[in-house]
Image (cartoon, rainbow, N blue to C red):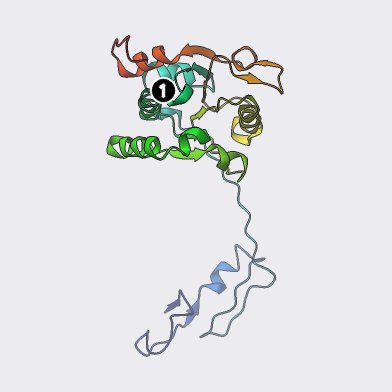
Amino acid sequence: MLCLDWRRHTPETCGGALPTRCLGSILIRPWPAAAVAGCRQTGRTPYVGPLSLTSTLALRPAADYLSGDLRRYMVGGSALNIVWDGIVGGTGRPQLHDLVVRLIRAGMQQVVLPTALSADGNWLRMFICELASDAVVPHVLLSEREVLDVDYPLLPVPTLCIYPRDDDEADSLYRRLREAPPFVGGNVPLVHLVSQALRLPSLGGLFLDKVNGLQVPAQDVYVLLAGIQDEDFF
Protein backbone atom coordinates (compact mmCIF):
# COMPACT_ATOMS: atom_id res chain seq x y z
CA MET A 1 0.00 0.00 0.00
CA LEU A 2 1.38 3.42 -1.00
CA CYS A 3 1.49 6.39 1.31
CA LEU A 4 -0.02 9.23 -0.77
CA ASP A 5 -0.94 11.58 2.06
CA TRP A 6 0.59 10.92 5.46
CA ARG A 7 -1.97 13.19 7.16
CA ARG A 8 -4.86 10.88 6.19
CA HIS A 9 -3.28 7.47 6.58
CA THR A 10 -4.34 6.20 9.99
CA PRO A 11 -5.64 2.80 11.03
CA GLU A 12 -9.16 4.25 11.06
CA THR A 13 -9.05 5.79 7.54
CA CYS A 14 -7.21 2.84 6.01
CA GLY A 15 -9.43 0.12 7.44
CA GLY A 16 -6.71 -1.07 9.76
CA ALA A 17 -4.06 -1.31 7.04
CA LEU A 18 -1.19 1.16 7.34
CA PRO A 19 0.98 2.25 4.36
CA THR A 20 3.89 -0.05 3.67
CA ARG A 21 5.62 2.07 1.04
CA CYS A 22 6.34 5.81 1.16
CA LEU A 23 6.45 7.82 -2.06
CA GLY A 24 9.26 9.85 -0.56
CA SER A 25 11.61 6.96 -1.31
CA ILE A 26 10.65 7.25 -4.98
CA LEU A 27 10.67 11.04 -5.26
CA ILE A 28 14.07 11.41 -3.61
CA ARG A 29 15.78 10.03 -6.71
CA PRO A 30 14.77 12.73 -9.22
CA TRP A 31 14.65 15.51 -6.61
CA PRO A 32 17.43 14.86 -4.07
CA ALA A 33 17.50 18.47 -2.83
CA ALA A 34 13.82 18.60 -1.94
CA ALA A 35 12.50 18.21 1.58
CA VAL A 36 9.35 16.96 3.27
CA ALA A 37 8.35 16.74 6.88
CA GLY A 38 8.53 12.98 6.76
CA CYS A 39 6.02 10.18 6.62
CA ARG A 40 4.21 9.80 9.93
CA GLN A 41 3.51 6.12 9.44
CA THR A 42 6.76 4.83 7.94
CA GLY A 43 8.95 7.21 9.92
CA ARG A 44 11.09 7.96 6.88
CA THR A 45 12.50 11.42 6.22
CA PRO A 46 14.46 10.94 3.00
CA TYR A 47 14.61 14.62 1.99
CA VAL A 48 17.07 17.09 3.47
CA GLY A 49 17.45 20.83 3.07
CA PRO A 50 14.77 23.45 2.37
CA LEU A 51 12.05 22.83 -0.16
CA SER A 52 12.88 24.86 -3.24
CA LEU A 53 10.85 25.27 -6.40
CA THR A 54 11.72 27.70 -9.16
CA SER A 55 9.66 27.99 -12.30
CA THR A 56 9.45 30.34 -15.26
CA LEU A 57 6.08 30.95 -16.90
CA ALA A 58 6.42 31.14 -20.67
CA LEU A 59 3.30 31.76 -22.73
CA ARG A 60 3.09 32.33 -26.45
CA PRO A 61 0.83 35.16 -27.62
CA ALA A 62 -2.59 33.71 -28.42
CA ALA A 63 -2.88 35.49 -31.77
CA ASP A 64 -4.98 32.62 -33.06
CA TYR A 65 -7.99 34.27 -31.43
CA LEU A 66 -7.65 37.34 -33.68
CA SER A 67 -10.24 37.41 -36.40
CA GLY A 68 -10.55 38.68 -39.95
CA ASP A 69 -8.73 41.83 -41.00
CA LEU A 70 -7.72 42.52 -37.41
CA ARG A 71 -5.67 39.33 -37.52
CA ARG A 72 -3.81 40.62 -40.57
CA TYR A 73 -3.04 43.86 -38.78
CA MET A 74 -1.89 42.34 -35.51
CA VAL A 75 -0.12 39.01 -36.12
CA GLY A 76 3.60 39.43 -35.59
CA GLY A 77 3.21 42.14 -32.97
CA SER A 78 2.14 44.98 -35.23
CA ALA A 79 0.79 47.90 -33.19
CA LEU A 80 -2.53 49.50 -34.02
CA ASN A 81 -3.33 53.09 -33.00
CA ILE A 82 -7.09 53.66 -32.90
CA VAL A 83 -8.06 57.33 -32.86
CA TRP A 84 -11.06 58.07 -30.65
CA ASP A 85 -12.30 61.52 -29.57
CA GLY A 86 -15.81 60.76 -28.38
CA ILE A 87 -15.51 60.55 -24.59
CA VAL A 88 -15.21 64.24 -23.71
CA GLY A 89 -17.73 64.99 -20.97
CA GLY A 90 -19.00 61.42 -21.11
CA THR A 91 -20.52 61.76 -24.58
CA GLY A 92 -20.07 58.77 -26.83
CA ARG A 93 -19.40 56.26 -24.06
CA PRO A 94 -22.11 53.84 -25.24
CA GLN A 95 -20.38 53.75 -28.64
CA LEU A 96 -17.02 53.24 -26.99
CA HIS A 97 -18.47 50.38 -24.96
CA ASP A 98 -19.69 48.74 -28.15
CA LEU A 99 -16.35 49.21 -29.89
CA VAL A 100 -14.39 47.66 -27.01
CA VAL A 101 -16.77 44.69 -26.82
CA ARG A 102 -16.27 44.09 -30.53
CA LEU A 103 -12.49 44.28 -30.14
CA ILE A 104 -12.61 41.64 -27.40
CA ARG A 105 -14.80 39.42 -29.55
CA ALA A 106 -12.24 39.91 -32.32
CA GLY A 107 -9.45 38.56 -30.12
CA MET A 108 -8.24 41.19 -27.65
CA GLN A 109 -7.61 39.18 -24.48
CA GLN A 110 -6.26 41.84 -22.12
CA VAL A 111 -7.93 45.24 -21.74
CA VAL A 112 -6.60 48.16 -19.70
CA LEU A 113 -9.34 50.66 -18.77
CA PRO A 114 -8.67 54.28 -17.73
CA THR A 115 -9.99 55.43 -14.36
CA ALA A 116 -12.70 57.49 -16.08
CA LEU A 117 -14.25 54.23 -17.32
CA SER A 118 -13.37 51.74 -14.56
CA ALA A 119 -14.83 54.14 -11.97
CA ASP A 120 -18.02 54.71 -13.97
CA GLY A 121 -20.33 52.13 -12.38
CA ASN A 122 -23.08 52.38 -14.98
CA TRP A 123 -20.70 52.10 -17.93
CA LEU A 124 -18.76 49.24 -16.35
CA ARG A 125 -21.93 47.32 -15.46
CA MET A 126 -23.28 47.59 -18.97
CA PHE A 127 -19.89 46.66 -20.41
CA ILE A 128 -19.46 43.54 -18.25
CA CYS A 129 -23.03 42.39 -18.86
CA GLU A 130 -22.50 42.65 -22.59
CA LEU A 131 -19.26 40.67 -22.36
CA ALA A 132 -20.83 38.01 -20.16
CA SER A 133 -23.64 37.42 -22.63
CA ASP A 134 -21.66 35.88 -25.46
CA ALA A 135 -17.93 36.69 -25.33
CA VAL A 136 -16.18 33.39 -26.09
CA VAL A 137 -12.61 34.76 -26.17
CA PRO A 138 -10.90 34.42 -22.75
CA HIS A 139 -9.98 37.87 -21.48
CA VAL A 140 -8.91 39.88 -18.44
CA LEU A 141 -9.93 43.44 -17.57
CA LEU A 142 -7.47 45.68 -15.72
CA SER A 143 -7.86 49.20 -14.44
CA GLU A 144 -5.26 51.89 -15.04
CA ARG A 145 -4.52 51.92 -11.31
CA GLU A 146 -3.94 48.17 -11.16
CA VAL A 147 -1.35 48.47 -13.89
CA LEU A 148 0.39 51.52 -12.44
CA ASP A 149 -0.03 51.30 -8.66
CA VAL A 150 -0.37 47.58 -7.99
CA ASP A 151 2.09 46.67 -10.75
CA TYR A 152 -0.22 43.87 -11.86
CA PRO A 153 1.66 41.41 -14.10
CA LEU A 154 0.73 41.88 -17.74
CA LEU A 155 0.18 38.79 -19.86
CA PRO A 156 1.76 38.17 -23.28
CA VAL A 157 -1.58 38.14 -25.11
CA PRO A 158 -3.22 40.54 -27.60
CA THR A 159 -3.80 43.68 -25.55
CA LEU A 160 -6.01 46.75 -25.85
CA CYS A 161 -5.07 49.83 -23.82
CA ILE A 162 -7.56 52.70 -23.59
CA TYR A 163 -5.56 55.76 -22.58
CA PRO A 164 -6.76 58.50 -20.21
CA ARG A 165 -7.10 61.98 -21.68
CA ASP A 166 -4.62 63.47 -19.20
CA ASP A 167 -1.19 63.67 -20.84
CA ASP A 168 0.84 62.82 -17.73
CA GLU A 169 -1.35 59.87 -16.75
CA ALA A 170 -1.29 58.54 -20.31
CA ASP A 171 2.49 58.94 -20.41
CA SER A 172 2.91 56.86 -17.25
CA LEU A 173 0.67 54.15 -18.66
CA TYR A 174 2.50 54.11 -22.00
CA ARG A 175 5.90 53.80 -20.32
CA ARG A 176 4.62 50.98 -18.12
CA LEU A 177 3.44 49.05 -21.18
CA ARG A 178 6.57 49.79 -23.16
CA GLU A 179 8.78 48.46 -20.37
CA ALA A 180 6.62 45.42 -19.48
CA PRO A 181 8.38 42.15 -20.41
CA PRO A 182 5.57 40.85 -22.68
CA PHE A 183 5.83 43.92 -24.91
CA VAL A 184 9.59 44.34 -25.08
CA GLY A 185 10.59 43.37 -28.60
CA GLY A 186 7.20 44.09 -30.14
CA ASN A 187 6.10 40.47 -30.56
CA VAL A 188 2.74 40.79 -28.79
CA PRO A 189 -0.22 42.38 -30.61
CA LEU A 190 -0.97 45.73 -28.97
CA VAL A 191 -3.81 48.17 -29.68
CA HIS A 192 -3.61 51.76 -28.38
CA LEU A 193 -6.92 53.64 -28.20
CA VAL A 194 -6.10 57.35 -27.89
CA SER A 195 -7.45 60.82 -28.57
CA GLN A 196 -6.06 62.81 -31.47
CA ALA A 197 -4.59 65.49 -29.20
CA LEU A 198 -2.96 63.21 -26.62
CA ARG A 199 0.66 64.13 -25.90
CA LEU A 200 3.46 62.11 -24.29
CA PRO A 201 5.72 64.46 -22.29
CA SER A 202 8.47 61.82 -22.06
CA LEU A 203 8.68 61.69 -25.86
CA GLY A 204 8.09 65.39 -26.41
CA GLY A 205 5.19 65.23 -28.84
CA LEU A 206 1.82 63.86 -29.83
CA PHE A 207 1.18 60.18 -29.15
CA LEU A 208 0.24 59.54 -32.77
CA ASP A 209 3.44 61.20 -33.99
CA LYS A 210 5.77 59.42 -31.60
CA VAL A 211 4.38 55.87 -31.27
CA ASN A 212 4.78 53.62 -34.27
CA GLY A 213 1.70 51.79 -35.42
CA LEU A 214 -0.95 51.67 -38.07
CA GLN A 215 -3.25 54.66 -37.45
CA VAL A 216 -6.95 53.95 -37.94
CA PRO A 217 -10.05 56.04 -37.01
CA ALA A 218 -12.40 54.32 -34.56
CA GLN A 219 -15.18 54.52 -37.14
CA ASP A 220 -13.18 52.39 -39.59
CA VAL A 221 -12.34 49.80 -36.94
CA TYR A 222 -15.99 49.44 -36.01
CA VAL A 223 -16.99 49.00 -39.65
CA LEU A 224 -14.18 46.46 -40.05
CA LEU A 225 -15.35 44.41 -37.06
CA ALA A 226 -19.09 44.81 -37.50
CA GLY A 227 -19.06 44.06 -41.20
CA ILE A 228 -21.58 46.82 -41.77
CA GLN A 229 -21.59 50.33 -43.18
CA ASP A 230 -23.04 52.52 -40.45
CA GLU A 231 -21.70 56.00 -41.07
CA ASP A 232 -23.76 57.48 -38.21
CA PHE A 233 -22.45 55.14 -35.51
CA PHE A 234 -19.76 57.56 -34.27
Q: 53 left or right of 128?
A: right
Front-most of residues 180 and 156:
180
User: Could you tell me if residue 47 is visible in this image?
Assistant: yes
Q: Position of residue 127 (x, y in %)?
A: 36, 35
Front-most of residues 5 and 104:
104
On the image, which quarter does residue 69 sit in? top left
On the image, which quarter does residue 134 sit in? top left
Q: Position of residue 15 (x, y in %)?
A: 34, 87
Say which quadrant the C terminus sits in: top left
**In percent of the image, x 63 and y 35: which residue is there?**
180
**In percent of the image, x 47 and y 16: which residue is there?**
73
Front-most of residues 95 and 107:
95
On the image, which quarter does residue 130 sit in? top left
Say which quadrant the N terminus sits in: bottom left
In the rendered image, which residue does mark 1 sit on? 91
**In percent of the image, x 62 and y 59: which residue is there?**
53
Q: 109 left or right of 15?
A: right
Q: Position of residue 52 (x, y in %)?
A: 65, 62
User: Could you tell me if residue 113 is visible in this image?
Assistant: no
Front-most of residues 104 and 38:
104
In the displayed structure, 37 sits above or below 112; it is below
Task: Classify mark 1: helix, strand or loop.
Answer: loop
Mark 1 crowdedness (10 Å alpha carbons): few <14, some 14-19, many ≥20:
few
**Identity of the residue furthest to the front in this view:** 89
Marks counted in the figure total 1
Amino acid at circle 1: Thr
In the displayed structure, 44 sits above or below 204; it is below
